[in-house]
Image (cartoon, grey):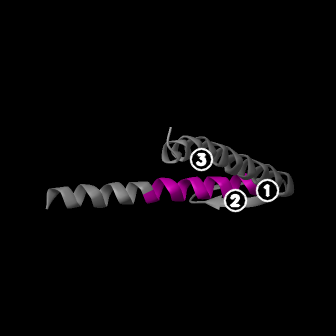
Amino acid sequence: MTDDVMEDATAGGGGSNSKLLIAALVAVGLVAFIVQNTDSTPVQWLVFDGSAPLWIVIAAAASAGAVLSELGGWMLRRRKRRC
């Protein structure tokens, strides 16, 4: 085998290991965030009133932002196809 083929073969394995390492670091960071933000905070939204742990409020806001971002991108792509 040539050196190019060997480098390509080893590069694929290293990429999956780095993705696993990044996922593990994100998971550890997420667990640390949850452990540090367990205090309840008041929540008011439209007519709803209550309290929830801070990490749930932040996670819900981030999830809603991601969904709205994807929805906006989908609408823009759809509009471009019609023109």
Which of these two is toward me, 47 or 73? 73
Query: How far is disc 1 from disc 2 in space, using C-alphas?
Result: 19 Å
Q: Residue 39 sits in which quadrant?
A: bottom right
Query: How far is disc 1 from disc 3 in space, using C-alphas?
Result: 27 Å
Task: Quickly name the residue at label 2.
Answer: 43
Residue found farthest to the top = 1
Q: Is residue 60 magenta?
A: yes
The residue located at (65%, 61%) in the rendering is 44
Left/right placement of residue 8 relative to residue 16 reads left
Residue found farthest to the left = 83
In percent of width and height, residue 6 lies at: 55, 42
The residue located at (74%, 54%) in the rendering is 55
Read off the magenta span.
Answer: 54-69
Q: Which image quadrant: the C terminus? A: bottom left
The residue located at (45%, 57%) in the rendering is 68
Of the numbered discs 3 and 2, the one sitting upstream in the chain is: 3
The residue located at (59%, 43%) in the rendering is 10
Q: Residue 33's mark?
A: 1
Of the numbered discs 1 and 2, the one sitting upstream in the chain is: 1
Task: Quickly name the residue at label 3.
Answer: 15
Amino acid type for the residue under numbered disc 3: Gly
Q: Is residue 28 magenta?
A: no
Which of discs 1 and 3 lies nearer the camera? The answer is: 3
Asked if the residues shown at circle 3 and circle 2 are in contact, with their CB atoms under 8 angstroms apart, the answer is: no
Amino acid type for the residue under numbered disc 2: Val
Q: Residue 69 sits in which quadrant?
A: bottom left
Q: Is residue 49 visible?
A: no
In percent of width and height, residue 2 lies at: 49, 43
Q: Secondary structure at mark 2?
A: strand
Q: Residue 54 sits in which quadrant?
A: bottom right
